[in-house]
Image (cartoon, rainbow, N blue to C red):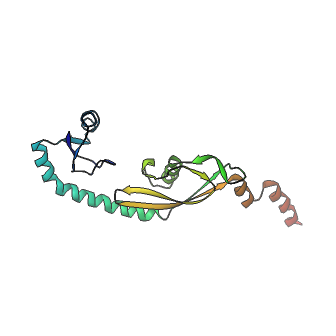
């Protein structure tokens, strides 16, 4: 079945493109969700007329994505997780964790656009790619610390309390 895509579809094609798909995929997924229309003669003529509009819209989306990429590349996230002796985390830092942290900073990015495969399971610093547009990918820094390292960086409450009386004398 030939369809004309109304939206960009990962691993299938771009908006306005005519692609050949399985009948079931087209009838049961693409057409009901208005992601595509059947490639009839009338729809092909309409797609040809809309192609310029699609190109302008894609160019503006790309420009917006480039602006967002410039802002995202300045972001540095830090996570503290429980870890073992050799830097192995008990759990992991996932794309959902990163999306929530970015959302807290005002960047509303879908977790599926964060290309983190596999999840982070070791302490360290990472560059994480985010695909904001099919032609625009940004990278941001993620630092993962173990709780033991984080505690060593800040004095324990008992040590801080012991240091205060000495300062008063």
Q: Which residue is at the front of the view, 56 or 20?
A: 20
Total marks in image: 0
Tell me: 62 left or right of 6: right
What residue is rendered at 19% in x and 56% in y?
53
Q: Is residue 30 above or below residue 16?
A: above
Q: Which residue is at the front of the view, 28 or 138?
A: 28
Tell me: 82 left or right of 120: right
Which of the 4 image quarters holds residue 26? top left
- Measured as percent of width and height from the top left, residue 1 is found at 20, 39
What residue is rendered at 13% in x and 52% in y?
48
Q: Is residue 14 above or below residue 167?
A: above
Tell me: 61 left or right of 98: left
In the displayed orientation, state which residue is furthest to the right.
169
Which of the 4 image quarters holds residue 34? top left
Q: Which residue is at the front of the view, 40 or 20?
A: 20
- Measured as percent of width and height from the top left, residue 131 is found at 40, 56
- Measured as percent of width and height from the top left, residue 8 is found at 29, 49
What residue is rendered at 24% in x and 34% in y?
27
What residue is rendered at 82% in x and 54% in y?
158
Q: Which residue is at the front of the view, 93 or 80?
A: 93
- Measured as percent of width and height from the top left, residue 116 is found at 49, 52
User: Quarter of the image containing the C terminus?
Assistant: bottom right
């Amino acid at each position: 079945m030939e369809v004309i895509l109304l939206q960009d579809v990962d691993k299938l094609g771009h908006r306005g493109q005519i692609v050949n798909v399985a009948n079931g995929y087209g009838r049961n997924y693409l057409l009901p969700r208005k992601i595509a229309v059947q490639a009839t003669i009338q729809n092909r003529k309409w797609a040809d007329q809309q192609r310029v509009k699609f190109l302008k819209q894609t160019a503006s989306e790309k420009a917006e994505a480039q602006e967002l990429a410039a802002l995202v590349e300045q972001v540095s996230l830090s996570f503290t997780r429980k870890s073992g002796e050799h830097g192995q985390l008990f759990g992991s830092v996932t794309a959902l964790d990163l999306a929530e942290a970015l959302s807290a900073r005002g960047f509303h990015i879908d977790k599926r656009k964060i290309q983190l495969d596999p999840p982070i399971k070791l302490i360290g610093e990472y560059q994480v790619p985010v695909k904001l547009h099919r032609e625009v990918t940004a990278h941001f820094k993620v630092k993962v610390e173990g709780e033991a390292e984080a505690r060593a960086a800040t004095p324990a409450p008992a040590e801080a309390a012991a240091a205060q009386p000495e300062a008063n004398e």
